[in-house]
Amino acid sequence: MSDRIMRCITSDGAVMAAAVDTSDLVFTAAKIHLTSPAATAALGRLLTAVAIMGNQLKQDNASITLRIKGDNSETGAIIAVSDSKGNVRGYVENPDCPTEYYSNGKLNVAKAVGKTGILNVMRDYGTGEPYIGQVELVSGEIAEDITSYYATSEQIPTVCALGVLLNKKTHEVMLAGGLLIQLLPGADNETIDKIEKNVSELEPMTTMLAKGMTIKEICEKALNGFEVEVLDEMPIHYACSCSREKVINAFITLSDDDIRSLADEKGFAEAVCHFCKKKHRFSKMQLEQIIKQKHSPK
Ligand SMILES: [Zn+2]
């Protein structure tokens, strides 16, 4: 596990750049969810985006959830979640969706995701009421949709690049990563011109990673011509937050009869986690104990 994320800022405070290597994370996600190439690319891009957005959360127990639901979507809904500590997880409704390619050989992610639809952004600061934003998809290629979210919902001029490179034969994830550049209040026209020039000269994310560029070098390339300070750097990985206890807490919200009816003909109830495919299994006797626990005073 060597995935890392880094956030940099120009020393005048005008521009922020964050770069992330999500190669292992997306590789792991594809192994867990047995995704088709199109689903791997779509889920991988959304996981990469949410990793960067999660890293921007300042609160300790905050998390962010991205949900894309395209019209006429082959992937179905795609969900990605990150906390502020580099724990990222996600899933795609139809992991075995068909894969199509553009004439240049690149994966047609927009076809799989849906060119129109909705991107939901939910920030949970751990204090109760989550903050929810929503934008229409502009392309279904995901990076443009994230850019559009920042522009319309948060009025932050943003450039977003996301990439997932698959082995042409095995379809295994070779490289994945992302870059987010944001203009902060006070960025003047000269700064904007410089950033636009830098962006026009940037190579695709996976090309830069394939060359062996570090995320720091990628941030510096994005902020070329400025004095750059590193705000923070940390490891990130695929990690699920599910637990037996959380499943029990969900069961407790049901009626006694509904809890009993969870058991199958063999007498077992099984809750499979969407995010990590872990099976949480309960015997009939354990279900009765949960019912007892539900009625006992705390
Ligand atoms: Zn899980």
Image (cartoon, grey):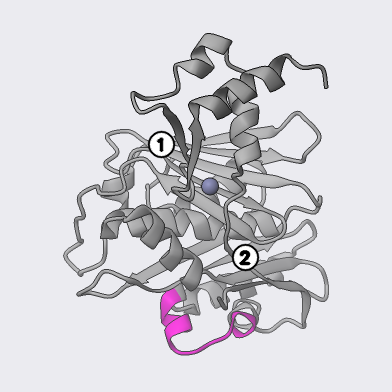
Indicate whether 253 appears above or below 208.
above
At label 1, counting other C-alpha atoms closer than 10 Å, the crowd grade (few under 14, some 14-19, many 20 or more) is: many
Q: Is residue 137 left or right of residue 213?
A: left
**What percent of the width, then of the height, locates residue 110?**
31, 50
Q: Is residue 214 above or below residue 284?
A: below
> Mark number for residue 84?
none
Q: Can residue 153 be seen in this snapshot? A: yes
Residue in the image at 57% along x and 29% along y: 286
Q: Residue at x 68, y 40 (%)?
A: 123
The quarter of the picture where residue 5 lies is: bottom right
Of label 2 and label 1, which has the lower sequence position?
A: 1
Helix, strand or loop at label 1? It is strand
Q: Amino acid at mark 2?
A: Ile
Looking at the image, is 148 positioned above or below residue 284? below
Specify the amino acid type for callout 1: Lys
Image quarter (top left, top right, bottom left or bottom right) of the C terminus:
top right
Query: How many discs appear?
Result: 2
Find residue 51 and report its horizontal and vertical position in percent. 59, 59
Residue 153 in picture, x, y percent from top left: 62, 39
Marks 2 and 1: CB-CB under 8 Å? no
User: Which image quarter holds the N terminus?
Assistant: bottom right
Q: Which residue is mark 1?
A: 69
Q: Residue furthest front?
A: 285
Q: Residues in magenta?
A: 206-217
- Within 10 Å of disc 2 (Cα), the crowding (few <14, some 14-19, many 20+) is many
Q: Residue at x 72, y 67 (%)?
A: 15
From the image, tell me which residue sits under label 2.
181
Instruction: Write down the quadrant of residue 182 in the picture.
Output: bottom right
Choose between 91 and 276: the one closer to the eye. Answer: 276
Left or right: 209 as drawn, with respect to 7:
left
Q: Residue 293 at what x, y percent from top left?
A: 70, 22
- Residue farthest to the bottom, as pictured: 212
